[in-house]
Image (cartoon, grey):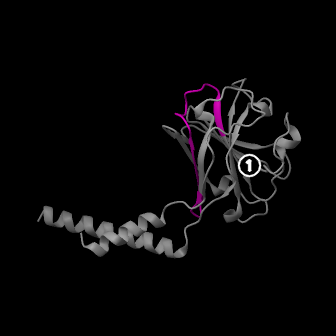
Amino acid sequence: MKMRHKFLIAAMLAASAPAGAATDPAGDFLATYTGAQSANLDIISASARFDGTSFTLSATMNGAIGATPGALYVWGVNRGAGTARLNALGTPALDPDVRWDALAVQLTDGTLRIVQFPAAGAPVITAIAGGAVINGNTISTSVPLSFWPTRGFDPTSYTFQLWSRLRVNPAADGFNSEIADFGPRIFASVPEPASWALMIAGFGLMGATVRRRTAVRYA
């Protein structure tokens, strides 16, 4: 492969890396948390990416996910009508700046529960088996925009905040004292037009390279 081709592909891969990401200090469990301080409840990093049709959410813990029964990971999403639900309804009250009007709940059996709170009526909950993908310390999820229609914000302005929870009752959330750690609040990254062009050019180049090698191999 020519050198300029290598540079183009390397730049393409760099452009595709999510920018909507942040790290979280290790061992910073909430003072109000009363459960076991297991490493797989300790958030290390979180990222969100929006490709125009879906949100990809990914988080890394300080230990292997699935090691603690009852653990789950919740993304609070503010689509424009977020309220401090944990502060208003939970005990003890938590950070009033944690505002959300939708959720993505990731369970350690791989189930994803997508929740949206409409302007009126009961929450709409969709369960997707296998929707939460676990790989060691990392758990990731993809949620189509159609599940989270805007409540005032443009989708590129939705905010995301992750928290980990250790349920006492496996069937339902209890008090806020079950919430172990909060990750940072982030926006979903969106590839810039120049990045998209670079990515498309790179994929086309790789396809041409593969076709050329195949033609030589079977000539």
Residue 94 left/right relative to 185 = right
> Tag 1, which secondary structure?
strand
Q: Where does residue 9 sit, x and y in percent of width and height?
A: 36, 68
Residue 102 part of the magenta segment = no
From this viewpoint, which residue is outermost toward the right?
88
Image vertical order of residue 128 relative to residue 70, above or below: below
- The percent coordinates of residue 140 (x first, y second) are 55, 45
Is residue 188 at all visible to an observer of this figure?
Answer: yes
Q: Tell me which corner region of the image, top left, top right, bottom left or bottom right, holds residue 139.
A: top right
Q: Is residue 183 left or right of residue 198?
A: right
Q: Position of residue 88 (x, y in %)?
A: 88, 42
Which of 206 and 177 lies nearest the eye of the viewer? 177
The quarter in which the N terminus is drawn is: bottom left
Residue closer to the observer: 215 or 1 = 1
Q: Is residue 159 left or right of residue 215?
A: right
Would you say residue 203 is visible in this rendering? no
- Identify the image quadrant of the C terminus: bottom left
Kind of residue at disc 1: Ala
Q: Nearer the viewer, residue 174 or 67?
A: 67
Quadrant of the rendered image containing residue 43: top right
In this rendering, the count of numbered labels is: 1
Residue drawn at 27 percent across, 73 percent down: 3
68 relative to 161, above or below: above
- Residue lying at the far left in this picture: please name it: 219
- Residue drawn at x 67%, y 40% as measured from the top left: 28
* Badge 1 density bin: few <14, some 14–19, many ≥20, Cα 10 Å: many
Residue that mark 1 sits on = 102
Q: Is residue 66 magenta?
A: yes
List x then y, in percent, for residue 29: 69, 36
- Residue range in magenta is 49-73
